[in-house]
Amino acid sequence: MGRYIIRRMLQGIPMLFLLSVVLFTLVNITPGGPLAGHGRSRHVKPEKAEMLKRQFGLDQPMPLQYVIWLIGNDWMKVDADGDGLAESRGERRGILRGDFGFSFQTRQPVLDEIAQRLPNTIYLMSITLIVVAIIAIPIGVLSAVKQYSIFDIVATTFSFMGQAIPEFWLGMILILVFYAWLQNPITGEPLLPPGGMKSLDAGFNLWDRIQHLILPVTMGMVGWVAWYSRFLRSGMLDVVHQDYIRTARAKGLSERLVMYRHALKNALIPLVTIFALDLPYMFAGSLYVELIFSWPGMGRLYYQAATKRDYPMLMAVLIIASGVTVGANLMADIVYGLLDPRVRYD
């Protein structure tokens, strides 16, 4: 197993390299640019815009910009033009040595801003995934065990509704209902806060943190609960008719033990593949949740970087999302071996 993990990690390096080339090219050929706003401003002289362009290194050819972004510019003694301005731009070590550069907008190190936002996204998405698993797995199993029952019909109806409802619309409806319409009968205040991670004057208050989580987690989980419960129901229906399930029942095992120990374990195997493919999408899908509920996370950071053409910040977020994709697929292969004894990596 250890050698397999090392081999897969080594295989992921050229994949990430190719992804970085594609992403860097797409980001830099996008119309506009980080100085588009300066160029349209009457208060910024053309020579000032040109100086900013040289300071950011945007006057260099795209291949050279990529090399500097990747391995740094400390190997350059002068600019490509030979005018000795490389030192005036500040030394960069490149992302291979942990330097993603400085944000064009805030002039702060990119990694410092990501370090402030990434834990917030992990915090929100981890709780969302836990809630999704707690709700979706029992619904999927019971729908398969009680096929065509009233419970199955109701669960199927809500699953279709959950997949059809636009996520951003659901978030706005939740705010309208639980903040604008419903009130706490004791204090008269809105029932739930409309956004943020915590109240500004609350300090560390567990109940306050839970209140701020309810609406974002609800918005983020509805679609995924609907999708995973339906997928698990389909997988369970395929598994319960296998020979080993009939053998387990013939041995006198209880129905609960047969379903949750034998059937569910095998039905989860294809679900692992879907989850591995969906994990990066969940990471990116936090964009809507964080924008609507003013959550200070990576999704909101990505939106701000994209709208302001903040190339270093945009590339850093995209590279992290690419790493999550590669890591999620490796994690799925490892879980295969834990769920299916027929899988061997030696």
Image (tube, rainbow, N blue to C red):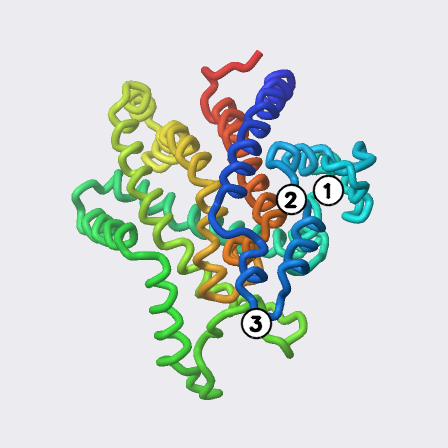
Question: Could you tell me how far apart the alpha carbons at marks 3 and 2 are, in whole angstroms?
Answer: 49 Å
Q: Residue at x 64, y 16 (%)?
A: 3
Q: In the rendered image, is residue 123 in sight?
A: no
Question: Could you tell me how far apart the alpha carbons at marks 3 and 1 are, in whole angstroms?
Answer: 37 Å
Q: Nearer the viewer, residue 111 or 28?
A: 28
Q: Quadrant of the N terminus?
A: top right
Above or below for 15 versus 202:
above
Place residue 288 in its image quadrant.
bottom left
Q: Nearer the viewer, residue 48 or 259?
A: 48
**Residue corresponding to mark 2:** 59
Amino acid type at circle 2 is: Asp
Place residue 269 in its image quadrant.
top left
221 lies left or right of 35: left
**Residue corresponding to mark 1:** 99
For mark 1, does the 10 Å Cα neighbourhood hold few (<14), some (14 to 19), or many (20 or more) residues?
some
Amino acid type at circle 1 is: Asp
Amino acid type at circle 3 is: Asp
Mark 3 and mark 2 lie on one chain; the one further toward the N terminus is 2
Q: Secondary structure at mark 2?
A: loop
